[in-house]
Image (cartoon, grey):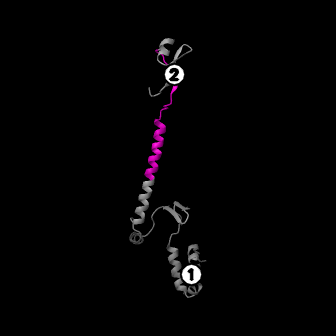
Amino acid sequence: MEHVDPVFDQLFAKIPPEITDTFTEEQLKAIKKVFGSRNWGRHPLDLRVSVPIPGLRFYLVLLAGSERALKQRLQYEKTVYPLWTAGKIVFLTGFLIILLASSFTTFSFLFSLLTSVPTSPYPTSIPWLHNKFECEHTGRTWRDGDCWDSEHNPMF
C-alpha cells in the first residue's frame, strides 16, 4: 500500500492531464520521494489573519516552532528572502509609530485617571470660625452652629 500525500495530490491535480500523462513511473516515484521527504507538520503557533481592507487583499501570517530545515535550505532562503527589505522596513516603521502613539495615549489616559484629584468645589465646615459674625464677615454661611464654605477647593 502506497502512502498518499494530500499536498502532492492537490499539486498534481493542478497539472494539465496532457503533461501528467507524459510522466514515466520513474519520474513519478522521484517526485513522490521528494514530497515524502518534506515535513508538512503543523507549527505550535500558526496564526493566519485576513485583514478586510476594501480594495486590498491583505493577510498576516505568524508561524513559530522548532527549526527543522536543512542548513543548505536555510542558507538559500537567507539569500532569496533577506531579513531587511524596503517593504519590511516601511511596515515595521509604521507599526512602531502606531504602537508608540497607542502606548502614549493609553498611558496618558491611565496616568490621568490615577493622578486626578476632583477639582470641583464642595461645601465643608471651617473649624476655626466659631461665631456667626466671623463666619458671615468672611463671605461664608452660618448653619447648624458651624461655618460653611460652599466653594472649598480640595487642592487647598
Q: Please provide percent x and percent y for residue 58.
A: 52, 65
Q: Residue at x 51, y 78 (%)?
A: 33
Up the image or down, 18 lies above or below 151; here it is below
Q: CA distance from mark 2 to mark 1?
A: 87 Å
> Residue placed farthest to the right in the image?
1
Neighbours of disc 2 within 10 Å: few (<14), some (14-19), many (20+)? some
Query: Is disc 2 placed on a helix, strand or loop?
Result: strand
Query: Is disc 1 placed on a helix, strand or loop?
Result: loop
Q: Please provide percent x and percent y for residue 19.
A: 56, 86
Q: Please provide percent x and percent y for residue 45.
A: 51, 59
The image quarter in which residue 89 lies: bottom left
Residue placed most toward the observer, 132 or 76: 132
Up the image or down, 53 lies above or below 129; here it is below
Name the quadrant of the N terminus.
bottom right
Membership of 103 in magenta stretch: yes
Neighbours of disc 1 within 10 Å: few (<14), some (14-19), many (20+)? few
Q: Is residue 130 visible?
A: no
Residue placed most toward the observer, 8 or 156: 156
Q: Which residue was labeled with disc 1?
A: 15
Q: Which residue was labeled with disc 2?
A: 124
Find the magenta span and give its range. 99-128
The number of numbered discs placed on residues in the rendered structure image is: 2
Membership of 32 in magenta stretch: no
Up the image or down, 152 lies above or below 145; here it is below
Up the image or down, 43 lies above or below 98; here it is below
Q: Please provide percent x and percent y for residue 155.
A: 45, 28
Q: Residue at x 50, y 73 (%)?
A: 37
The image quarter in which residue 5 lies: bottom right
Residue type indicated by callout 1: Ile
Residue type indicated by callout 2: Thr
Q: Earlier in the sequence, mark 2 or mark 1?
A: 1
